[in-house]
Image (spheres, helix red, strand yellow):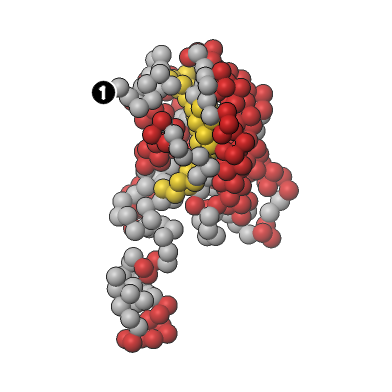
């Protein structure tokens, strides 16, 4: 059976680690040729060796418009064009409270998480038009939907990614370019360590620790893994999603379905505190 991305060319930012790496692996398995764009050269070189002729690594800091443009042009020079862009590179910060934000820190987060994908879309469009259309997928976050899942600059930047995807979807639909966002929940990657400023090797080890301990943080009793998000990116990138644009797909094992007491019997329901034994079972969390 032909792969679901047979004949397609994709560019994936943040493509050498975590969600981006999982998506490179899945897209290649589905027949795509991939430009993996990132700032970790050693991992990029290893990826090229793993997938000769199928993956090229482009050094690309997404805070540089010139580097974004150059990385995307590799899709054409190496593989003949561009059909799919996965704007996924990211990091977080430690400005957890509004009282702690700095002008430089705020701009840095927005440059990576919002301006990077915006410029990625800008430079992908002319290449996609040459192919008669395309699909753009932007990585947002559940932090862009609810408070409590990330620092304030990061969270508001991810909310911007969701809305920017909608606006771009409206603008690009006449040109047959679809734009969607994915909101991952807690996924076992290096981002937690990297955001604390730890060296990459240490951050990479933390991903395994998250994988071991993340089965109980959401209703679905397994740790969220890069492949869970890659599968969503594959759907949105592929022709299976031909009628889907401007959407944000929440892939979080149900962590945002509601209060914890709704799915975790051990978590006290606020209704129990109010009504004690008189609380109806559904309110007490006894579903
Ligand atoms: N892991 C989670 O729980 C989670 C949840 C929601 C959203 N996300 C988002 O998923 C995306 C991927 O993160 P991940 O969890 O796979 O983390 P990761 O650290 O494993 O991967 C992020 C990649 O982005 C690259 N990167 C960072 N800054 C860059 C820059 N300026 N230019 C180019 N590349 C850069 C890193 O080198 C790294 O390879 C991010 O946008 C992140 O915000 C992650």
Left or right, 22 with respect to 79, comes to: left
Identify the residue at horizontal 35%, vertical 27% (top origin).
4
Residue 170 in the image: x percent, y percent? 59, 39
Identify the residue at horizontal 34%, vertical 65% (top origin).
263
Left or right, 146 with respect to 266, comes to: right
Compare residues 136 and 246 and report the one nearer the observer: 246
Considering every residue shown, the one lying at the far front of the view is 174
SS at badge 1: loop
Q: Is residue 259 visible?
A: yes
Identify the residue at horizontal 33%, vertical 81% (top origin).
280
Residue 148 in the image: x percent, y percent? 52, 60
Q: In which quadrant of the rendered image does the N terminus lie?
A: top left
Compare residues 253 and 136 and report the one nearer the observer: 136
Residue 271 in the image: x percent, y percent? 40, 80
Compare residues 4 and 13 and report the one nearer the observer: 4
Residue identifier under label 1: 1
Q: Is residue 235 above or below residue 210?
A: above
Pointer 1 local density, CA inside 10 Å: few below 14, some 14–19, many at least 20: few
Q: In which quadrant of the rendered image does the C terminus lie?
A: bottom left
Quarter of the figure with residue 63: top right
Q: Is residue 112 visible?
A: no
Q: Is residue 123 above or below residue 17?
A: above
Quarter of the figure with residue 21: top left
Identify the residue at horizontal 68%, vertical 47% (top origin).
106
Considering every residue shown, the one lying at the far right of the view is 103
Q: Is residue 265 above or below residue 116?
A: below
Q: How many marks?
A: 1
Queried on whether the Cβ of the residue with tag 1 lies below 8 angstroms from ligand 1, the answer reads: no
Residue 233 in the image: x percent, y percent? 43, 36
Left or right, 159 with respect to 34, comes to: right
């Amino acid at each position: 059976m032909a792969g679901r991305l047979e004949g397609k060319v994709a560019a994936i930012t943040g493509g050498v680690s975590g969600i981006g790496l999982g998506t490179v692996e899945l897209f290649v398995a589905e027949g795509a040729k991939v430009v993996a764009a990132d700032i970790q050269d050693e991992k990029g070189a290893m990826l090229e060796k793993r997938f000769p002729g199928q993956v090229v690594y482009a050094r690309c800091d997404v805070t540089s418009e010139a580097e974004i443009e150059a990385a995307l042009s590799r899709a054409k020079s190496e593989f003949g064009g561009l059909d799919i862009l996965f704007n996924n590179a990211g990091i977080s910060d430690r400005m957890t409270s509004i009282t702690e934000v700095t002008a430089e820190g705020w701009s840095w987060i927005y440059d990576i998480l919002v301006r990077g994908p915006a410029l990625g879309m800008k430079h992908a469009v002319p290449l996609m038009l040459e192919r008669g259309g395309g699909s753009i997928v932007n990585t947002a976050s559940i932090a862009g939907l609810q408070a409590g899942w990330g620092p304030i600059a990061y969270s508001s930047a991810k909310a911007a990614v969701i809305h920017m995807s909608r606006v771009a979807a409206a603008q690009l639909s006449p040109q047959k370019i679809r734009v969607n966002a994915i909101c991952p929940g807690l996924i076992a990657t290096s981002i937690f360590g990297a955001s604390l400023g730890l060296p990459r090797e240490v951050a990479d080890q933390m991903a395994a620790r998250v994988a071991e301990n993340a089965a109980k943080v959401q209703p679905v009793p397994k740790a969220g893994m890069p492949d869970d998000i890659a599968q969503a990116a594959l759907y949105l990138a592929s022709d299976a999603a031909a009628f889907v644009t401007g959407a944000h797909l929440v892939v979080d094992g149900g962590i945002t379905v509601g209060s914890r007491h709704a799915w975790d019997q051990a978590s006290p329901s606020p209704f129990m505190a109010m009504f004690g034994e008189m609380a109806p079972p559904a309110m007490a969390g006894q579903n």
